[in-house]
Image (cartoon, rainbow, N blue to C red):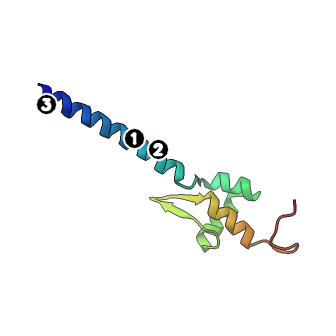
Amino acid sequence: MRNGKKERRNHELFSKGKKMMKKTQFEEREKLITIAQTSRILNVKESWVRSAVFKKTIPFIKIGHHVRFDEGELMDWIGRNRKGLGKEIPS
């Protein structure tokens, strides 16, 4: 019996460590956003975003049949595509 309790305790510690590890990996992962959220950020229609995905002119990620955008990559893309006043955003 004693050995069984020890094994259960080790399993609980391992499980807790695993959950903590998953949470840390999730926190480090970039935030993925939808087409609707992307269209709000860019202030364009969703159809424009879908068209840009079809033309592959905007960075996107396919998860099965779902299209998602990495928020950090999207912000970098916006910065690279700035025209006119320069690449720096005035403060």
Please tell me which of labels 2 and 3 falls first in the chain. 3
Q: Point out which mark residue 23 bears.
A: 2
Residue 9 position (above or below residue 66): above
Is 15 in front, or is 55?
Answer: 15
Is 21 in front, or is 36?
Answer: 21
Question: From the viewer's perspective, is the residue at label 1 or at label 3 nearer?
Answer: 3
- Quadrant where the image shows the N terminus: top left
Is 52 in front, or is 23?
Answer: 23
Q: Is residue 82 left or right of residue 17?
A: right
Question: From the viewer's perspective, is the residue at label 2 or at label 3 nearer?
Answer: 3
Dot 1: element = helix
Amino acid type, label 2: Lys
Quick check: marks 1 and 2 in contact, CB under 8 Å? yes
Tag 1 residue: 19
Name which residue lies at 66% across and 51% down. Answer: 37
Quick check: marks 2 and 3 in contact, CB under 8 Å? no
Image label count: 3
